[in-house]
Image (tube, rainbow, N blue to C red):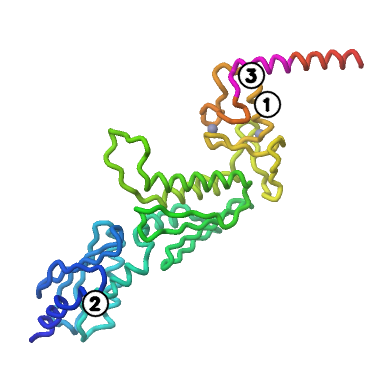
Amino acid sequence: MSVITEELEEVQKFLCSNVDGIDIISCHKHLVTIKILKTKHRELTACIQFPNNYPDAILLVEIKSKVMSPSLMSHINQICDQELKKFVGQKQVFQLTKFLRRFLDENPLLPCRDELTYVKKELIEDGDSLKMKQKQGVITAEIKQNKYNFKFTVSVPDKYPVERITIQIDHHTFPACMTYYFISQAREFARQAVEPPLRKDKKKSEFSPSPHIKKVMEFLIKGCAKRYPLETCPLCDDLTLPEDPKEIINNAKDAKYAERIYCGHLYHHGCLDKYMKTPPFQEGKKCPKCSHRIYHDKWNINPKLAEDRWAHQEARQRELDEVMDFLS
Ligand SMILES: [Zn+2]
Ligand SMILES: [Zn+2]
């Protein structure tokens, strides 16, 4: 019996009981096809052919996957070839299957490899750092902008993207209320990616969970950590946050306190207060940078009331001025 025939028999008899989560799709001397499944988003199929001088040459392997990207597949193909070189002269199908199984088990970041490639290439700059612990499925990014610093960790669950990532801030130099917003918004993006909306949109097709690492990390890096240290107040054009985070003002009534409003722009409390209390009021107050209407709990009054208050204050000021004239 030839080596190949013997090996094919072994594959049929023993492979399924030897390696978890596999499915033999075909098994004959021209083609062996084995599907290996860890989760729905971590699965691949190995198409194997025996070269003429087998087992003195390595198996001809082609890796396919419905869920993982072609570039990742060609990467896996390369490391399979490397691995098989260790077994030249021996039977290789078992070794290959076990290797691929281990590879799927030990790489929870596989389903987000393309997203992470984007993050690394497009979002991480000199001075920042991005560390990945493949086996634990953990990504840590440390982002710097001027003297500001923002470090966070993303943990990728086994069932990503069906299950959402968890996000945690490790260290930061931003005002506490701003980081609270950063993290809440990031978690909300992750939630929306895996949970169907409460109100169904009939026009949209059936909901299915979607990858969300790119969106979350883009928001935290580009939309927060890189953005706000450079953000200027739309009303006075000075930097809204102090250049040195050590000088951050936490008193919400201080004129230089940084106030983030709904559109995302960052104002000095004093500048915004003055703007909100000065006419015209009728059209509602708009953000000079983006023209969005400004809604804020602190200035949540109707135009009529704002007008009355302003008139009252003006009248009071006139009285005061008259008193001052009288005294001087
Ligand atoms: Zn200002
Ligand atoms: Zn705005």
Question: Which numbered disc, 3 or 1, marks the residue closer to the eye?
Answer: 3
Is disc 2 surrounded by few (<14), some (14 to 19) or many (20+) residues within 10 Å? few
What is the magenta segment's predominant secondary structure?
A: helix
Circles 3, 2 touching at the beta carbon (< 8 Å): no
Question: Which numbered disc, 3 or 2, marks the residue closer to the eye?
Answer: 2
Is disc 1 surrounded by few (<14), some (14 to 19) or many (20+) residues within 10 Å? few
Quadrant housing residue 205: top left
Specify the amino acid type for callout 2.
Asn
At a point 66% along the width and 21% down the height, the residue shown is 278
Left or right: 238 with respect to 66?
right
Label placed on residue 96: none
Is disc 3 surrounded by few (<14), some (14 to 19) or many (20+) residues within 10 Å? many
Cα separation between marks 3 and 1 = 12 Å
Of callouts 1 and 2, the N-terminal one: 2
Q: Is residue 27 in view from this perspective?
A: yes
Of callouts 3 and 2, the N-terminal one: 2
Residue named by callout 2: 18
Specify the amino acid type for callout 3.
Ala
SS type, badge 3: helix
- 166 up-or-down from 36: above or below: above
Specify the amino acid type for callout 1.
Lys
Residue named by callout 1: 274
User: Residue 252's spot in the image, x, y percent?
Assistant: 68, 38
Q: Range of the magenta residues?
A: 301-314
Q: Quadrant of ligand 2?
A: top right
Quadrant housing residue 165: bottom left
Left or right: 121 with respect to 81?
right
Q: Is residue 69 in view from this perspective?
A: no
Question: Label 3 CB, ligand 2: below 8 Å?
Answer: no
